[in-house]
């Protein structure tokens, strides 16, 4: 989904710090094409600080919780109306908000770019719907259904940061000075967000026979590739773990605290002291240095090795605090250090709110959602939850800056993450003991689990992107999924379902090949060779019909030509090895059809090449698995399509040749 960004810059003359809010101070507002507007802020500095303190701590002597909530809501309402007037004073803003709502363009991002430290004290996130926009002026701008808006912040130095978003996520969870109960709740939230990618043994540990259960070390190693926890952490602990490997996401659960050793006592995060005793308040630049341990500064002051996302579950960590000495809140400064996405809180956050925020943000981010959508959904989840604090939703502040090509990067990231979900589900189905046999007295619970996993697989398959650039890949992948399902149904004695899935796979493979070779009217298309999808189509034709007809042979020659082109790719590369795998299987089919020893010998040579030169073990393992299907399924069990229960003598002979040569090729891939 495309997110339209409306950028509003609020500027003033002079240095960023050492300036208090005053109605007498003129600011410059820049939004859209309407030019520069002079605006003022209707607060004396101490008045706003008092207002913010009353939002954070509405309780008082003799005040009941319900009265405190009502008082807090009244303050939020009043402040939200005043913030709305500040935003609406920029004449370019309302027309853009109205236009986005009128054309039903989905989520809009209102990005507020700040240069003056004192302006970061303003809670822009509680703005209401300005007059002239679609929606009631009494509604919060972030939650109107007709034109939902995600309010974000940024700095001028981070307008278009270079980044590579399409990376396999690895989360560092840092905790310090908080209860074990809260750490466990956040750890559980992160694991729930990671669940679609967790290996089966990490989600079902204890349900397997003892001989199949992984050791604690194996579990730790597998989990370490996705999530690392450092509890009671010091800055040195963070530096050491980041020096050992980069992380894409960092989640920090610690208290915010003032640093008495620095002028103005700015707010930092409280970690364990490096001496092993006491606590130490860490500044944003020190944390950024630790997160990028072992790397060097770039010319634009951002660091290599920094995570893509940092979430700060620390109360008031997005509050600017003292603006005389400080150049912004901890979240603001960490973003300015080069972290593209920093999500923090500007007011105290409840226990339930912090865990719900963590679960919602990471569930969306890891699924491949836009971070602005993740932030918007987190605010919505806090706003609608009865168990969270009344102003938890208003606490969330997101500093987000993304490159111009982010939509393309995000699209690739979502596609690869979805493929990983599907592959993980297929591994879970394969590992389920129900698929290992077809006894009549098989465990019903395992059978139900297999069927439940297949339903999940269908649901995840439907989530694959429909963008034209993935058309060929998605069709071929759907063909592979249907083929794997056919094998599963065969093993649990659902023969009709197995045949139906094989026919579906054959259709998908042919559509994928046609998409690969046909012209397209779209500008953006990913080029993929048709040899693999054509080969798989021909395999299923051979299995379902027992032979290849004249039209099939035309496709066979086309597949051989396409594979021969990719066989010239760099030596040992995936492209070359996959092409050799297609050529091997094409010659296997031809040898079975024609009983010609030349094709059999070519298949053997290609199998030896795959075994000897593949740099990646996956193509070899995949080819072995495919050849096994000829041995224990296709050649001996499945009847030919339309042939009834009896096979002709010619079909029996071709299947025997197919099985024998597949067995020989399998041994070559195993032993060379």
Image (cartoon, rainbow, N blue to C red):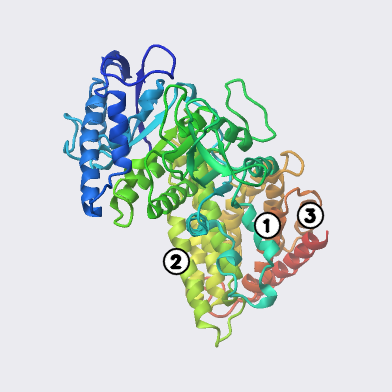
Q: Earlier in the sequence, mark 2 or mark 1?
A: 1
Q: Earlier in the sequence, mark 1 or mark 3?
A: 1
Q: Which residue is mark 1?
A: 221
Count neighbours of disc 3 (C-alpha within 10 A) and say few if under 14, some if 14 to 19, many if 20 or more: some
| Disc 1 element | helix
Q: Nearer the viewer, mark 2 or mark 3?
A: 2
Depicted 523 relative to depicted 448: above or below: above
Q: Earlier in the sequence, mark 2 or mark 3?
A: 2
In terms of depth relative to the viewer, which is nearer, 395 or 193? 395
Q: Residue furthest bottom?
A: 441
Q: Residue furthest top?
A: 13
604 with respect to 321 (left or right)? right
Count neighbours of disc 1 (C-alpha within 10 A) and say few if under 14, some if 14 to 19, many if 20 or more: few
Say the numbered circle drawn on residue 70: none
Q: Which residue is mark 3?
A: 611
Depicted 535 relative to depicted 251: above or below: below
77 with respect to 446 (left or right)? left
496 with respect to 395 (left or right)? right
């Amino acid at each position: 989904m495309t997110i339209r960004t409306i950028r509003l810059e609020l500027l003033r003359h002079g240095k960023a710090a050492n300036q208090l809010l005053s109605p007498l101070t003129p600011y410059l507002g820049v939004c859209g094409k309407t030019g520069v507007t002079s605006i003022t802020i209707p607060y004396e500095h101490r008045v706003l600080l008092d207002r913010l303190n009353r939002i954070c701590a509405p309780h008082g002597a003799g005040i009941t919780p319900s009265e405190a909530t009502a008082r807090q809501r009244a303050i939020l309402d009043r402040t939200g109306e005043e913030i709305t007037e500040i935003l609406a004073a920029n004449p370019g803003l309302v027309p853009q908000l109205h236009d986005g709502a009128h054309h039903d363009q989905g989520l809009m991002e209102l990005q507020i770019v700040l240069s003056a430290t004192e302006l970061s004290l303003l809670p822009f996130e509680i703005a209401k719907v300005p007059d002239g926009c679609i929606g009631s002026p009494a509604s919060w701008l972030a939650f109107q259904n007709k034109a939902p808006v995600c309010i974000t912040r940024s700095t001028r130095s981070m307008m278009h940061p270079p980044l590579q978003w399409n990376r396999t996520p690895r989360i560092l969870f840092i905790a310090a000075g908080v209860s074990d109960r809260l750490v466990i709740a956040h750890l559980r939230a992160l694991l729930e967000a990671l669940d679609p990618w967790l290996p089966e043994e990490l989600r079902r540990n204890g349900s397997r026979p003892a001989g199949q259960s992984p050791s604690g070390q194996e579990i730790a190693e597998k989990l370490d590739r996705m999530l690392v926890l450092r509890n009671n952490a010091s800055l040195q602990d963070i530096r050491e773990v980041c020096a050992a490997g980069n992380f894409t996401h960092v989640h920090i659960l610690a208290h915010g605290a003032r640093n008495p050793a620095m002028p103005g006592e700015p707010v930092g995060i409280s970690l364990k002291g490096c001496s092993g005793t006491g606590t130490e308040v860490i500044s944003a630049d020190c944390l950024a240095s630790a997160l990028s341990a072992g790397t060097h500064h770039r010319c634009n002051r951002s660091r290599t090795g920094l995570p893509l996302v940092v979430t700060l579950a620390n109360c008031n960590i997005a509050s600017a605090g003292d603006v005389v000495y400080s150049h912004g809140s901890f979240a603001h400064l960490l973003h300015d250090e080069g972290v593209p996405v920093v999500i923090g809180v500007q007011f105290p956050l409840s226990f339930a709110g912090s865990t719900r925020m963590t679960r919602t943000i990471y569930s969306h981010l890891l699924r491949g959602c836009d971070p602005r959508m993740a932030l918007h959904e987190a605010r919505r989840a806090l706003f609608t939850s009865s168990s969270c604090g009344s102003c938890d939703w208003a606490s969330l502040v997101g500093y987000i800056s993304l490159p111009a090509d982010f939509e393309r990067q995000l699209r690739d990231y979502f596609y690869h993450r979805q493929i990983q979900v599907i592959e993980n589900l297929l591994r879970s189905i394969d590992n389920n003991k129900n698929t290992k046999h077809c006894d009549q007295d098989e465990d019903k619970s395992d059978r139900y689990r297999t069927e439940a996993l297949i339903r999940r697989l269908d649901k995840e398959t439907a989530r694959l992107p429909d963008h034209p650039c993935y058309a060929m890949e998605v069709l071929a992948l759907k063909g592979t999924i249907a083929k794997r399902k056919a094998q599963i149904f065969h093993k649990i004695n659902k023969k009709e379902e197995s045949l139906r899935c094989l026919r579906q796979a054959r259709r998908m493979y042919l559509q994928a090949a046609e998409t690969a070779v046909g012209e397209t009217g779209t500008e953006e298309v990913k080029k993929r060779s048709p040899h693999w999808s054509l080969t798989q189509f021909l395999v299923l034709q051979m299995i379902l019909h027992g032979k290849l007809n004249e039209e099939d042979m035309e496709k066979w020659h086309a597949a051989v030509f396409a594979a021969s082109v990719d066989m010239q790719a760099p030596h040992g590369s995936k492209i070359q090895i996959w092409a050799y795998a297609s050529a091997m299987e094409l010659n296997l089919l031809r040898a079975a059809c024609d009983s010609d020893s030349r094709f059999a010998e070519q298949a053997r040579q290609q199998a030896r090449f795959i075994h000897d030169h593949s740099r990646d073990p996956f193509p070899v393992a995949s080819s072995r698995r495919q050849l096994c299907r000829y041995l224990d399924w296709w050649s001996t069990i499945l009847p030919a399509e339309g042939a009834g229960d009896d096979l002709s003598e010619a079909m029996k002979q071709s299947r025997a040749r197919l099985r024998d040569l597949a067995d020989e090729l399998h041994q070559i891939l195993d032993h060379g």
